[in-house]
Image (cartoon, rainbow, N blue to C red):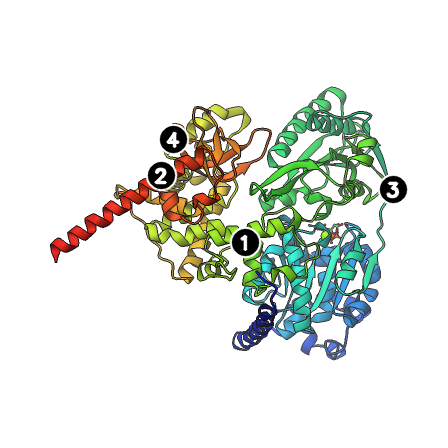
Amino acid sequence: MSDRPSKKLKMDSEAEKVAEAAEEHLKQHPHPVPTKQPYVAHDDGEFKDWIKHQTTAEQAQKLEDGPNNAFTGNKFSQKYFDILKVRRDLPVFAQRQQFLDIFQNTQIMVFVGETGSGKTTQIPQFVLYDDMPHLAGTQVACTQPRRVAAMSVAKRVADELDVELGEEVGYSIRFENKTSPKTILKYMTDGMLLREAMDDHNLSRYSCIILDEAHERTLATDILMGLLKQVSIRRPDLKIIIMSATLDAEKFQSYFNDAPLLAVPGRTHPVEIYYTPEYQRDYLDAAIRTVLQIHATEPEGDVLLFLTGEEEIEDACRKISLEGDELVREQNCGPIKVYPLYGSLPPNQQQRIFEPAPEGANGKPGRKVIVSTNIAETSLTIDGIVYVVDPGFSKQKVYNPRIRVESLLVSPISKASAQQRAGRAGRTRPGKCFRLYTEEAFKKELIEQSYPEILRSNLASTVLELKKLGIDDLVHFDFMDPPAPETMMRALEELNYLQCLSDEGDLTALGRTASQFPLDPMLACVLIGSPAFQCSEEILTIVALLSVPNVFVRPASARKRADEAKMAFAHSDGDHLTLLNVFEAFNSEEAMQHGLHQWCRDNFLSYRSLTSARSVRAQLRRIMEKHDLDLVSPGYDDPDYWTLVRKALAAGFFMQVAKKKSGNKGYLTVKDNQDVLIHPSTVLAAENEWVIYNEFVLTSTNYIRTVTNVKPDWLVELAPKYYNLDHFGDGDVKLSLKRIIERVETMNKQKEKKDKKKKSKSS
Ligand code: CDP
Ligand code: MG
């Protein structure tokens, strides 16, 4: 990490080398061109020359009018024309020519418009009709901060273009790739595009990259912006569009060297804002009451309620459904349908939010209620919303570099978010927004804009990615908002302890391999290190299970039975080992014969999480194979089976360790000295002296979750650099470690002596 000129020079020439290598790679592996010749290219004399010239909006529209699909040559279906009619009413259509004028004459542009104006679904199609990527063998990418949005929008646009999802239009999210060689438009999470950039620094397969929802300022989008700024110099042919919902456009414009801006005037209706007269102690309860009151008293129109996470949302959905049915019976209200929406919801259930509201009855309107996380703020547009209920909270990532804890915390939203939420009520006609906080609080307590994620995150993954992207000089990387130096130092330090970066801050062979895994560097290191403990098959399972939503289901109505079911899989040494037992059982003959769905229900396990863990595991396994990492297992018969697994875990989790406090029931995190308790969900039988943990849960009491018992001797042996006592504050932990280190040293010496004796005897 230095800004010496020699480093900089090295970087430039490296970048050149990389660019050359990428070109060479492209020559040898050209992007496959679809075999079916598109309609425009050969069939019709009138259209023949268009692709050589730049297309006008009128010409593009003519192509869209059919009768044949310009990208597949197939005849358009009736459904296509039905959707086309609706699409043509979207605000962006009025500005197609203006868009094309700017797009064709500039490399980077900024495009802003109200949510629902058609940015995400239409702009990539405008680009397709101008670019004709299928003829050049290139692709258009459109990034989304959220997996849900990438999947849902890809599905919609596939319908709009009258193609199968995964063919011409596809999506790519972590652990799931639904694209084919035919794909010309790819919706993807910003994180996935970043991963692609690690292997192809010039993103050479793309002719146009659209960074959507840029106002969200996710970590990956921020890095991509800095990266694309560099790539745009190396690749003058690459077009870049920065799309954003709010009118924070100047910041993007000036960052991209005064890029031109196109703003689509919104077609929004006035929204009346209501505040509560006083502070609401229980916002969940207040929210449910408000929704029910809207249903009982307000005229027709659907309701959107913003809550913070899956559990809260499912809980609210149940309560609103139950009490809504009561309203139907007792007050003759119309029927009410409640739908949840959050990131981990399966796609088919997500699509249900687009179903129409139920028919009214007794002269009272039927109503659809959607209870959603932030996803519905800008990422997904749901038509028909007239009432918004906004408790003023969302789950936000926070990071404290001093104690190295990153957490998702329910925190107050910003004014910008509150306005965006209110705006959802005015999409189709005038609406109302009920804020469950006082006007005073809105004015005085909410910050203007949310802080970008890069200022609130652990940057270990990011630093590793940047290094892999060939960016050595992190200090001079052109961040839109540079992260705090302390956070950056922490990340470098962490990667150095993991041996992903050398003491000079250069990427090591291990770091290079670790960056190939779509995992947190620590988990990647656990995997890469596992063959040395003969248990990579086991660690693969554990890492896969740690990468999917919780496999244990604990319904409010059957907590006790669920806990009992879990204990059947428990391993007394910890939760990681218990996960291994669950997965073994899930793959057993017995479960199969039982029927997996039923087996999961009977055992209070999530079928969805387990199947997705299976697929994640298979993908990680392929990456292991690709990098010649041994796939081995000690086998159950090995008396050391569980010890080997625990050792392999300790080898990577050595920075996430807690030690039992003497004479006290709590634990203290090692080195960072935080008071914690083991989360009640643990299966760990007795209280163990030293444990590794997967997660630090920051609440009024701090918990560590998913814990496994380890031997401290392993820690000091496996991570001597981290357990260097000079870096520990005085106290109980240091004293214990000192004793352990002395013990280990004595034991090693004795062993050496013995070995020597043996040697001399045998010789
Ligand atoms: O990106 P932006 O918020 O500007 O709008 P969009 O996501 O492109 O959505 C434009 C319109 O497409 C919405 O108002 C919906 O009418 C429609 N749409 C839909 O019907 N189904 C989807 N899954 C997505 C969008
Ligand atoms: Mg959008």
Element marked by disc 2: helix
Camera-side residue of 545 and 524 = 524
Q: Name the residue under label 4.
A: 568
Q: Which of marks 1 and 3 is in front?
A: 1
Rendered residue at 63%/59% (across/down): 475
Q: Mark 1 points at which residue?
A: 492
Q: Are marks 2 and 1 in contact (CB under 8 Å)?
A: no
Q: Distance between the residues labelled 2 and 3?
A: 69 Å
Q: Name the residue under label 2.
A: 740
Q: Mark 3 points at which residue?
A: 270
Q: Does the residue labelled 3 lie within 8 Å of ligand 1?
A: no
Q: Distance between the residues labelled 4 and 3?
A: 57 Å
Q: Quadrant of the N terminus?
A: bottom right
Give the mark nearer the N terminus: 2 vs 3.
3
Give the mark nearer the N terminus: 4 vs 2.
4
For badge 2, the amino acid type reads Ile
* Residue 178 showing in the rendered view: no
Rendered residue at 59%/59% (across/down): 194
Q: Which of marks 4 and 2 is in front?
A: 2
Residue 111, percent from left and from top: 78, 59
Give the mark nearer the N terminus: 4 vs 3.
3
Q: Are marks 4 and 3 in contact (CB under 8 Å)?
A: no
Q: Distance between the residues labelled 1 and 3?
A: 49 Å
Q: Nearer the viewer, mark 2 or mark 3?
A: 2
Give the mark nearer the N terminus: 4 vs 1.
1
Element marked by disc 4: loop
Camera-side residue of 663 and 61 = 663
Give the mark nearer the N terminus: 2 vs 1.
1
Q: How far apart are marks 4 and 1 (CA)?
A: 42 Å
Residue 364, percent from left and from top: 79, 29
Element marked by disc 3: loop
Camera-side residue of 265 and 256 = 256
